[in-house]
Amino acid sequence: FQSDKYMVWTSASHSGSSSSFSSLLLERQQSGLTHRRLWRTPALLRRIELRAVLEEHDGCVNTVSWNTAGTQLVSGSDDCRIAVWDAWDPSAARHARRRCVVNTGHVRNIFCAKFQPDSGDTKVATCSLDGTVRLQDLRSGGDTLLGRSHAFVSKFEYVPDTPPVLLAAAHDGLVSVFDVRAAQQPVALINLSHIGGCTTLAFDPAAPGPLVAVGCEDALVRLYDLRLLGGEASEAAPVKAFGARRLLEASRRGRAHLSQGASGLAYSSSGELLVNLRGERMLLFDSRAPAGDSFQHIPVLADTIAEYHGRANDETFAKECAFLHDGGYVTTGGDCGHLFVWGKRSGELLLKARGDGAIVNCVAPHPALPVLAVSGIDSDVKIFGLGEARRGRESAQSGHRRAAGESGREGVGTARWSGAEV
């Protein structure tokens, strides 16, 4: 492997099993040798297929998340439990096995679960339809109530550089701070209740300060600087917003919003913002570009880098989105139960694979390996990884149609490998 070039692994260079390849990659990752450009290799993308199904839950799996090292995966479900999995262990007989299951104190559907960064993967924060945010201790099985919202909490993120603190978006329109160190009443920093519920949020990893993008039930994604907040939540002003120009123009003309808001947000390592809109396309913005428009006295960046067609996002509010291959590709799920992957710049739909019997909501790329955890309405988690290199494997998108030509059509290019639908 050469760190200064894209890594290519094809049948011409290696005919061994995918497990030995994954083992090699994990060993190199753990020894600090794996280069982040690994994920960019188109040859690897074409070899991604369903590799494992993790079965434990009794209800929809609404959240999947890796730990920082990519050695463990946590899932949360309508059954009010979380499951922790040892994932992609090359020394194991199987590449994924259940580590533990925790009956949380939640009484309604769990929508987000994440390892606490400074806990050595021994603690997991969770939020739920019951409006509570809780902390699970995996060693003792203890459950701590961190706070309660007036409506259900759908998403949270740890504030960068302050792991004991997390920021949560609730459907009462409030974005609030929860302190993991002590159970206390959450502090509301942002109030968008006059617009609707807050659905999702994401921190910009490339920003010099704590900048957080917040999705609400309209076509704008608002960007806030946490250093400027702390007064009345209703007076919190975004520093900028992101919204497609055609949606802003439709709103100015008095037409109903064409979107029901963002169901998922994701930042690339360079600060590009991916916005997964309900009832609309998935959009990519250069968050460093200046705002050239305004809407309701908010400076707005209305020019998109790319827009991605071909999947429907109408049935749920929980569809995530993510960057793959070190930011070279983007991915999300669809109402048709498929996983979609596009070229980030080209907008070309490169992969469409069955990921759920009904709807794919969650997409969680491994932090380093060509592995992707997917979940939705089914009561399991599906792990996509490298299959064996075979000559003549079909492209996941027949003819590699451009996404711009597939707007509104989800039945195109079903992935078939080895004669079976994935």
Image (cartoon, rainbow, N blue to C red):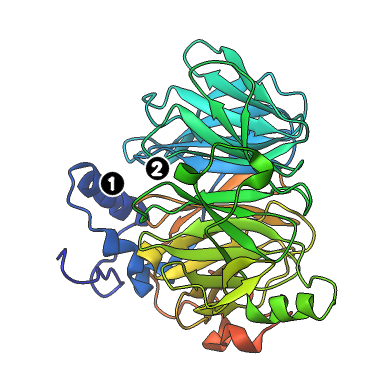
Badge 2: residue crowd in 10 Å (few <14, some 14–19, many ≥20): many
Q: In the image shown, does 310 or 279 lie closer to the viewer?
A: 279
Q: Quadrant of residue 56?
A: top right
- Residue under the point 36% across and 73% down: 43
- The answer for how far apart the CA atoms under marks 1 and 2 are is 8 Å
Dividing the image into 4 quarters, which one contains the C terminus?
bottom right
* Tag 2: amino acid: Trp
Is 246 displayed left or right of 114 in the figure? right
Q: Who's the residue at 61% across and 23% down the image?
A: 134
Q: Are marks 1 and 2 in contact (CB under 8 Å)?
A: yes
Q: Nearer the viewer, residue 116 or 259?
A: 259
Amino acid found under the numbered disc labelled 1: Leu
Give residue 150's position: percent from left, percent from top: 77, 31
Q: Which residue is mark 1?
A: 26
User: 418 above or below 161?
Assistant: below
The disc placed on residue 88 is 2
Rendered location of residue 189, percent (x, y): 60, 39
Relative placement, left or right, of 51 versus 288 is: right
